[in-house]
Image: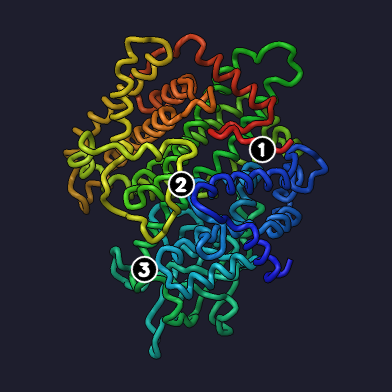
Amino acid sequence: MTGTAQTAAVAASAPGGPPGRWEADARARAARLEALLGDPYEPANPHGLRALFDADGRRTPPPDTEALLDEVGWAAEFVPAAYGGRLTRADLLARALRPVFRRDVALGFGHGITSMFATGAVWAAGDERLRHEVAALLLGGGRATILHHELAHANAILRDEFTARPAPGGGHRLYGRKDVVINASRADAHVVYARTDAARGPRSHSVFLLDPARAAPGTMRHLPRVETSGMRGALFSGLEFEGRAVPGDTLVGGLGDGVALALRTFQVNRSVICGVVTAAADTVLHSAVRAATTGRAGPVARRWHKPLTGVFADLLACDAMATVALRALGLLPGRAHVCAAAVKYVVPDLLREDLEELAAVLGGRGYDLDSPEYGALDKLVRDLPVAGLGHAGTASCQAVIVPQLRTLAETAWFAEEEPPPELFRPGAELPALDFRTLGIAGGGDFMAASLAGSAARLAAGRAVGGQIGALAELAEAFVAELRALRETCRTLPPYGSRGLADPAVCVLSDRYSLLVGAAAVLGVWEGQDGTDPFLADPAWAVLALSRLGARLGVPVPDLPDGCVRQVLDELIRRYRSGLGCDLDATVLAQ
């Protein structure tokens, strides 16, 4: 499809009408894409898991599926509706992306979501000209990539950086080298986070939007492709700049705004990543259920009850956390940064542990890429760390959370009002995501307030016993942990002190993030309207909170009778009905 034709096709399918239509439109697009991608287990399907595994083995992007995504204008999901795209709310963006990530994380990153990472700075601080240029590029089938600044604890993608030095006639000249950049060789725009001040500090970097086709000869060099152990189907290579001219009109925002723009946009990236990779883990859980049920006339063997139900509860919890963080970006944009970092801190650990549990169920079949029914485990184990869910991601989240803890303990915890109920209520109309309104400091802690409020409302349930009693007991245990954390955090050194880097202090971010996870689970459970009887019932929340509590080390009551059986029955029902293990019980292609 030509760029002009593709732009027209995208415009024809862009969201229209009032916010009440946004959710229905996003879900319809996701369902259509799910149907177009087809049965992932059909060997002859060019977009099925076997074809995607084969492309991974060849270390190439899957050409047929990339062509399909171009045909449907998938990149329009990353362009705000005000500029002709489909992006309205962040939670709906994640829902629209899940059909691709459910099949292949590398495809999702290599073909699309990297453009979102890159262009977030333009939506946050670019002038109207830059915004329209980027929108036209993506809507016309182009790609953008991000050239990160170097971070502490950096992995290969985040290692090394570029320097922009003032040029005599105005503008800057760009120098430096990065060996690992996703889509460096086929991007139509480079969003470069370059150092413009040698001094360390919040004004050290600036952001530039560059067209690689306009680089003067000899000032930009493409470096060879880099082979990675994970996301092998994505294209990683390097770039080197030797005095490339950077005109003044390519500056995004103001000079020195780079660090602030990174902090503002990373909270979107973190939350979306958590929302989409959970769908990839869903595929592995379905494989494990298949392994535990195929060839059996009777019920699932008892030894598999705990891992299967536990992972199912974890995936619901991960979806709850990601959904709350994504919805907060539109509803509470000036206050969502700590919540987003906490969710990104917790979800990767849960998913890694879940894959280990599922590996015990799948055995050697989980590493057989000749088997689309079972081989997704091996690929996801390799892809997750490269997708930003490794140590570098954890360290960057700690850098957001730890400096906030003393202030939150002194001013917010047990003193702040709860967030609006729309944050947790399915189907609630929410404002559009506006990158310009995202905050990076202050704003209190609405998740801690929600946790305390949920526990207070459940307190009377302790006398009832059963699952409600267990839920009330768990909620109070998490609130007691928040009280203990408050006392500890009040003694922390002030912001800017080197003492905040002490490993013992960094551990506090573990405790805090698990409390945010518990608050999300309780909030989502309380927000149910009864449309889904399983989610309205406390069994899944009890199991999810019990697992979070065990990780945190708080007192966890024995699971009530029938709790595991209820969750297992729902898991088997969803598997046999072709439904996803997410909060939406998404209808999957068969």
Task: Report helix, strand or loop for mark 1.
Answer: helix
* Residue at the (37%, 18%) spot, across then down: 556
The answer to whether 460 is drawn above or below residue 365 in the figure is above
Which is in the foreground here, disc 3 or disc 2?
2
Task: Report helix, strand or loop for mark 2.
Answer: helix
Please, what is the three-letter code of the amino acid marked with disc 2? Answer: Ser
* Residue at the (40%, 34%) spot, across then down: 520
Please, what is the three-letter code of the amino acid marked with disc 3? Answer: His
Task: Report helix, strand or loop for mark 3.
Answer: strand
- Tell me the quadrant of the picture where the C terminus can be found: top right
Sequence-earlier tag: 1 or 2 = 2
Point out which mark residue 205 bears. 3
The residue identified by callout 2 is 271
Point out which mark residue 528 bears. none
- Find residue 13 and report its horizontal and vertical position in percent: 64, 57
The residue identified by callout 1 is 376
Other-residue count near label 1 (Cα within 10 Å), few / some / many at <14 / 14–19 / ≥20: many
